[in-house]
């Protein structure tokens, strides 16, 4: 308890330096929390598009069921297909009506006979999409092939770019946070140099002298972690409605509360790591045994 009291005393004695440490570390943990949530969202979006049909083959009106079955069997034999679904003309009409339910006039103009039957194909990996599309293109029964590899590839590129950029920015801010914790605690040690010397003269142990400064670093980390996630929690209700509308149909929202609890635990743990590392370096440099 006395060590904890000494730690809070160190923080209050240099309020401006302590505030700077809290701000930088809170900003760092806030940005890392944003990065984690963005990456989780990107992974959900990517998984959603990967689960959607990536190649669609539309058949000619005169194509027979035997021809379609042969094509389906040929695709399955490649071992590259994760899912394949046949959409009849009648099912295509049902989908058309669902997609255009706000325009009933179109229902009277379109019949099942006007819509093509199709095969919707999802590959086990997007690298197989060109091969599957090529097979379908060379089939006489197929009139048109819709190939959406570019959507998944673009998402993968963006996900990788965000991951790399986030790691670089996060590393820079973590380094800056460690540095400012180190400087702040070093200054606190310097301002108490005379008091520390007296404590040594009266026989205070090294751990008794050092632990308040280590605990000070831990306090910086814990409080900053709570502030960082708290800011996310306050901002999230403001940004989620427009994002949810923009990503309509993609199951990104709502984000379960369990995610925020886990995020808080990760942020506090990371904050403690940064605080302990910065304070340990400061203590090792300034309080040599």
Image (cartoon, rainbow, N blue to C red):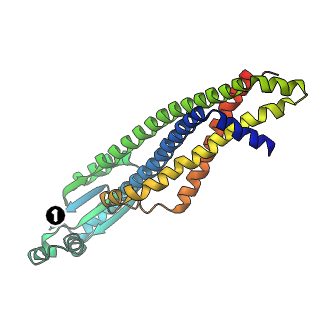
User: Which quadrant of the structure image shows residue 161?
Assistant: top left
Is residue 209 found left or right of 182 in the rendered image?
right
Question: Is disc 1 placed on a helix, strand or loop?
Answer: loop
Extreme residue toward the right, this view? 203
* Closer-to-camera residue (96/127): 96
- Where's the C terminus, which quadrant? top right
* Closer-to-camera residue (265/129): 265
**Residue 69 point in image, percent of width and height:** 30, 66
User: Which quadrant of the structure image shows residue 101?
Assistant: bottom left
**Residue 158 point in image, percent of width and height:** 37, 42
Can residue 69 be seen in this snapshot? yes
Q: What residue sits 58% from the left and 46% below the top?
A: 225
Q: Is residue 118 above or below residue 167?
A: below
Q: What residue sits 47% from the left and 34% below the top?
A: 169
* Closer-to-camera residue (97/283): 283
Q: Is residue 167 above or below residue 229?
A: above
**Dot 1, how many residues are within 10 Å of its Cα: few (below 14), some (14-19), or many (20+)?**
some
Can residue 79 be seen in this snapshot? no
**Residue 280 point in image, percent of width and height:** 71, 30
Q: What residue sits 87% from the left and 31% below the top?
A: 205
Q: What residue sits 91% from the left and 28% below the top?
A: 203
User: Which quadrant of the structure image shows residue 97?
Assistant: bottom left
* Closer-to-camera residue (228/108): 228
Q: Label 1: which residue?
A: 60
**Residue 38 point in image, percent of width and height:** 43, 48
Is residue 281 found left or right of 64 in the rendered image?
right
Total tally of numbered discs in the picture = 1
């Amino acid at each position: 308890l006395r060590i904890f009291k000494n730690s809070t005393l160190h923080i209050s004695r240099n309020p401006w330096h302590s505030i700077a440490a809290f701000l930088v570390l809170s900003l760092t943990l806030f940005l890392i929390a944003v990065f984690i949530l963005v990456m989780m969202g990107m992974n959900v979006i990517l998984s959603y598009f990967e689960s959607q049909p990536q190649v669609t083959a539309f058949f000619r009106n005169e194509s027979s069921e035997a021809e379609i079955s042969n094509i389906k069997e040929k695709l399955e034999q490649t071992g590259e297909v994760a899912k394949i679904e046949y959409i009849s003309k009648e099912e295509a009409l049902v989908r058309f009506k669902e997609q255009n339910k706000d325009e009933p006039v179109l229902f009277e103009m379109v019949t099942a006979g006007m819509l093509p039957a199709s095969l919707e194909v999802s590959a086990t990996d997007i690298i197989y999409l060109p091969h599957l599309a090529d097979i379908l293109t060379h089939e006489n029964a197929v009139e048109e092939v819709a190939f959406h590899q570019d959507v998944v590839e673009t998402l993968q590129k963006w996900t990788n770019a965000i991951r790399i950029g986030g790691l670089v920015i996060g590393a820079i801010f973590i380094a800056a946070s460690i540095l400012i914790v180190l400087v702040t605690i070093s200054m606190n040690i310097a301002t108490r140099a005379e008091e520390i010397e007296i404590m040594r003269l009266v026989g205070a142990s090294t751990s008794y002298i050092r632990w308040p400064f280590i605990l000070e670093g831990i306090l910086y980390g814990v409080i900053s972690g709570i502030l960082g996630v708290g800011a996310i929690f306050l901002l999230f209700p403001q940004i989620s409605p427009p994002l949810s509308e923009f990503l309509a149909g993609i199951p990104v929202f709502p984000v379960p509360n369990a995610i925020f609890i886990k995020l808080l635990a990760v942020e506090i743990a990371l904050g403690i790591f940064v605080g302990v590392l910065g304070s340990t370096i400061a203590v090792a440099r300034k309080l040599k045994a």
